[in-house]
Image: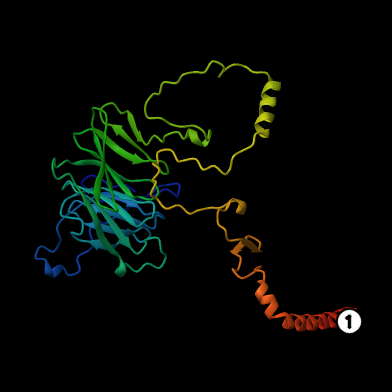
Amino acid sequence: MVSLFEDQPVLVEISSPRPIKHILPSQPPPDDPSSNPFGKERKQSTCVTIFTALGNHILAGTSAGYFNIIETESRKIIHNSKHSIGNSMIVLLRLASNGRDILSNSTDRIIRTLHIDPDLSSVDLNPDVIRLEVEHKFQDIVNRLSWNHVGFSGATGEYVAASTYMNHDVYVWERSQGSLVKILEGPKEELGVLEWHPARPLVAACGLESGCIYQWSIVAPQKWSALAPDFVEVEENVDYIEKDDEFDVQDAEEVHQRRLDLEDEEIDVLTIEPVKGEEEDQDAFRMPVLLDLGDSESEEEVIAVGPGTMRRKSPGAGREWTDDAKVDSGAEDKKANGTSGARGQSRAKKRS
C-alpha cells in the first residue's frame, strides 16, 4: 500500500504472479448530490496510509484533515471523521502496539494522540459504533516548532517522542499526564526519522545531513552490593590507611587456628550497646527487665506458678501460728487432727 503525491492511494496485491493494483478512495461518496450546487465535495487527497495490526483495515489521513478507515477486502471507507483531527494536512500516522491508539502529526504543528473504540481487529465490526476521540495535544507553545517524525514508546506506548524541524532536539511527552518530561539534546544537525526500541528504554534517530544514526538510552547503575554484601558505595573519595599486615600472605594453619580461637570466645548477648548517632535520654522511660530473681531487692518472695509465669507469694502463706493462738485452740487442733487422721486412713484403704 502506498499513498501517492497528488493522486489516489494504491493497494497492490502481490500474492499472484502478476501484481494487481487497486485504487483506494480519498473521500466517501456524497450522500445527496443535490445538497451541493457543484455536485461534489471539497477535493482532497490522501497523504498518509497505514495498516492496522491484522491488516484487515487501512487508516488514512487526508490533506483536509479528514481521518478515513478503509476496509481492506472491500476497499470502501467505512468510517470518516470530519474535522476531528483538524483542518490541517495530516502528514504522519503511527499506530501503537495495542492497535487502539493512534499518533498523528499535522501541518498545524500539533501532535495528537487518538483512541479508537472498539478494536478494529474484531471480526464482526459494526461501522456505526466506531468512535474516534482525541486524547492529548502536544505542541511547543513558546518556539512554535514543527515536527519531522513522531513515535510511541516500546510496547506500552506510555511516552511520545518527536524530532524537530530545523532543530537538533528530541522532545518526549508523558501520555498519562499530558506534559513534557524531557528534551534530549542531539547532535548539531537536524534529525529525521525517530524510532523507539520495542522493549528497552532506547531511542534512535537519523541525521538528515550525515545519515548517522544517534541513540539515547538510560544507563543503569551497577549494583555491586548484589555481588558483595559488605560493599559500600561512597559519593566522594575517602583516604584509606593500609594496615601493616592487611595484605600479607598468612599461613593456612595460622588462619585455621585463628578461626578456632574465635569460635571459643564467649559472646556477650546481655549487654545492650547504644545505637550510633542516637543520644541517650536520661528521662526516657525504660521497661525494667529482671533476668535473675535472686538479684531482686524486694523483700516479698516470688514463686513460679507455671513455665515462664511468676507471681508474688500470698502475704498469709507460710506464716506460723503464734503461741497464744496455739493455747486457745488446743482442743480444736486435737479434734482436727483426729478427723484428718481418720480421713487419711480411709484414703489409704481406698488406695490399697
Where residue 311 sits, quadrant-wise, is bottom right
Apparent side of residue 289 relative to residue 14 in the rendered image (left or right): right
> Residue 131 is drawn in which quadrant?
bottom left
Q: Which residue is mark 1?
A: 349
Question: Label 1 amino acid?
Answer: Lys
User: Which residue is painted at 85% across and 83% down in the image?
Assistant: 346
Q: Residue at x 32, y 55 (%)?
A: 101
Q: Vertically, is 71 above or below 265?
A: below
Front residue of this view, candidates 211 and 247: 247
Of the 4 image quadrants, the one containing the C terminus is: bottom right
Image quadrant assignment for residue 86: bottom left
Which residue does the image show at 64% across and 68% down from the upper left?
319
The x and y percentages for residue 108 are 15, 48
Q: Nearer the viewer, residue 124 or 95?
A: 95
Name the residue located 40 percent from the left edge and 49 percent from the top edge.
Answer: 155
Q: Residues within 10 Å of mark 1 (few under 14, many from 20)?
A: few
Residue 189 location, x and y as percent? 23, 29
Residue nearest the viewer, comparing 212 with 327: 327
In the image, residue 28 sits, relative to residue 178, either above or below, namely below
